[in-house]
């Protein structure tokens, strides 16, 4: 189930490339991943989160994650950055 706090977050990044960049820079609180996204694409993100000790929250579908992030297409990954 999607955490409603993501709707209210202004400090978020959406997408695999942007999330990976944010993780490498540091300052990410937690990451959302869509269960129906390609596991091969998610693997590097999940591994980075594991290394950095960050919580990974699952969302049922890419379209649900995209909608909650305010974009018209699905999203495989989104991250909430520290303020």
Image (cartoon, grey):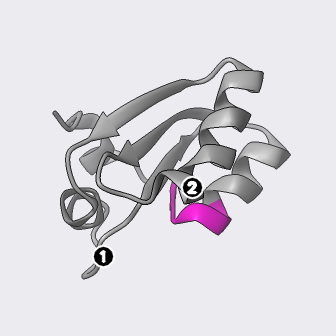
Q: Residue at x 16, y 33 (%)?
A: 1
Side of 54 relative to 35 (left or right): right
Q: Residue at x 60, y 37 (%)?
A: 46
The tag earlier along the polypeptide, 2 or 1, is 2
Pick out the residue farthest to the bottom: 72
Residue 17 on the magenta span: yes
Q: Position of residue 43 (x, y in %)?
A: 61, 45
Q: Position of residue 13 (x, y in %)?
A: 53, 59
Which one is in front in this view, the residue at disc 2 or the one at disc 1? 2
**Residue 40: mark:** 2
Residue 7 on the magenta span: no
Residue 11 appears in view: no
Side of 76 relative to 24 (left or right): left
Pick out the residue farthest to the top: 53
Q: Position of residue 61 (x, y in %)?
A: 22, 55
Secondary structure of the residue carrying tag 2 is helix
Secondary structure of the residue carrying tag 1 is loop
Can you say which quadrant of the picture contains the C terminus?
A: top right
Q: Which residues are magenta?
A: 11-18
Q: Residue at x 82, y 46 (%)?
A: 24
Q: Mark 2 to mark 1: distance in Å?
A: 23 Å
Read off the residue under disc 1: 71
Side of 53 relative to 10 (left or right): right
36 over 23 or under it: above or below: below
Number of dots carrying numbers? 2
Query: Are there few (<14), some (14-19), or many (20+) residues within 10 Å of tag 2?
Result: few
Query: Are there few (<14), some (14-19), or many (20+) residues within 10 Å of tag 1?
Result: few
């Amino acid at each position: 189930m999607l955490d409603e706090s993501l709707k209210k977050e202004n400090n978020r990044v959406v997408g695999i490339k942007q999330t990976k960049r944010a993780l490498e820079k540091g300052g990410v609180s937690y990451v959302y991943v869509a269960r129906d996204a390609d596991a091969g694409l998610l693997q590097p993100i999940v591994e980075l989160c594991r290394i950095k000790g960050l919580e990974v929250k699952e969302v049922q579908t890419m379209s649900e994650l995209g909608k909650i992030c305010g974009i018209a297409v699905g999203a495989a990954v989104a991250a909430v950055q520290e303020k």
